[in-house]
Every structure is written in C-alpha cells, then in structure tokens.
Amino acid sequence: MQSTMHGVAREELRRYLDTLLDLSRFHDYCPNGLQVEGCATVRSVVCGVTASQALIDAAIERQADAILVHHGWFWKGEDGRVTGFRKRRMAALLAHDISLFAYHLPLDAHPELGNNAQLAKLFGWTVDGHFGEQDLGCTAVLPAPTFTGALIDQASQIFGRPAMLIGERDHPVKRVAWCSGGAQDWFEAAINAGADLFMSGEISEQTTHLARESGVAYLAAGHHATERYGVRALGAHVARELDLDVEFVDIDNPV
C-alpha cells in the first residue's frame, strides 16, 4: 500500500485492515470494517475501545480523519433508528467527515494484535490451545505453577483496577484459560479444556455457582479493561506500517 505524507486513501486503509484481520473468517454480531464513510484521505487516526460520544469528541478535538475501535455500531438486534444519542453520534461524524472503522471478533482473535494475544503478552503466557465460539478462547500452561491469589494480584496491577476472584486465593493453578470482554458464558467450556482458572472481563450470577461447584476459579477483570490492548496494538501497527498519525484515547469505563 502506498503511504506518504499526504496520507492513505480511505479505501486502501479499509482493504488493508480487512485483510490483516481476516474478516471473511468470522460470523459476528455486527458489521466489521468501515461502518461510517468519511473523507477520502486518512492522515490521522484516533483509536479507542468503543465508538462513544466521548471518543468522537476526542477525535474532533484532534482533527482526526478516522476513528478505529473494537466496539462499533449496528449491533444485531439493536434498534436501527437513528434517533437520540445515535443521531448525535452519527451527526458528529458526518459533520466532520470522520470515518468509523470497527473490528469486533476479528480483533479479539488476531494471533498477534488481538485482545487475547495481547493479554497473553501482558501476563507472560504462551497460547497452547483454543476453545469456545470460533476458537476465540485461549489456554496456556503457566511457566511455573502458582496460586489464584498471585494471579488476581497480577491482574489488578496490570489493569490498574481491582479484579474480582471467585475462588480461594490458595487454589493452585497450573493451566489457565481466558477470553477478553463478555465471555463468562464460556466458563464451562474453559473447565472442559482443563483450566484451573478462567479469566474474562464480565461475570454473571450463575458464574459464581459454577466456580464453587467445579472448583475452578473465575477471575473477572472488567470488559473495558481487558479489551484496551488489541485496538492499541492495532493502532500502533497502523502507525508503523502506514506512516499515519495514530493516537490511542482511553475513555474510562468501570465495567
């Protein structure tokens, strides 16, 4: 792809990202790729976890040509009418000619830049297997056996916020499973994959009972917290490979 000080064509950027993240492989709950068409040439990009009004405002302030996110718009089953907050978000993008690129499951799964790959890098784990829907979940044998207490302390330090542990702190852990975001429904699959501990972002009421009854610990670290790293890595890749001005903006989210 040609990239100069004059930027990259929007459609060239779309094709590059779509190919890099292997869109055709995934069945998703939303359209991946270019969701809102902005100006024809992209020079600067703001990336973040979710295409919220706050992120759009940050992009406008920085005079960005495009926004790159993990959580975009047009989710399956969502009200499709462009009213209220949807109108305000859309109007802001269109008024400033800003493109919106969003990559959901393809960004979770990418073996180098994806959310789950980046979590492995942060924790020092080596992926040795996959499980769950479209093989998004990952497993690893720890470099050295440890205890759940040490892992939750490590998670709280990495994510900069208290993580929640369902299980005893002195429970031994040799094999871990993880999937970023809202993968609590995959807990049983993680247990069947041989995990001593499963980490995801969110937790549901029934998760507690399954952890207690199975003896497998569950670590809930936050949906937003566990999904900051894929889009940040993707943004850094785009900046490096395409010589674009890319800034990651972290809009705080306690969930």
Image (tube, rainbow, N blue to C red):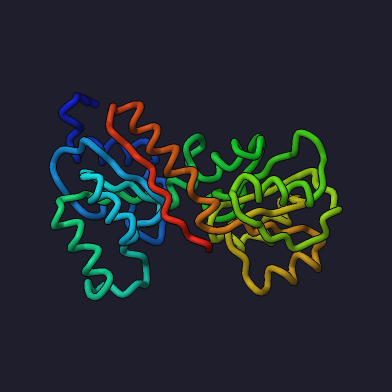
Above-or-below relation of 123 to 76 = above
Residue 128 at what x, y percent from top left?
66, 37
Q: Is residue 11 left or right of residue 101?
A: left
Residue 96 at what x, y percent from top left?
15, 53
Q: For the N terminus, give its image quadrant.
A: top left
Is 139 in front, or is 37?
37
Is 110 in front, or is 158?
158
Residue in the picture at 62% in, 44% down? 158
Residue in the picture at 26% in, 51% down? 100
Residue 11 picture quarter: top left
Residue 120 at what x, y percent from top left?
61, 39
Report if residue 254 is visible in the image: yes
Above-or-below relation of 20 to 27 = above
Q: Number of labelled discs?
A: 0
Is 8 in front, or is 30?
8
Report if residue 109 is visible in the image: no
Residue in the picture at 50% in, 34% down? 112
Q: In this view, does 29 lie to the left or right of 59?
A: right
Q: In this view, does 12 lie to the left or right of 74?
A: left
Above-or-below relation of 112 to 94 = above
Q: Is residue 242 left or right of residue 190?
A: left
Residue 45 at what x, y percent from top left?
28, 41
Residue 66 picture quarter: top left
Residue 246 picture quarter: top left
Residue in the picture at 22% in, 49% down? 99
Q: Residue furthest front?
A: 61
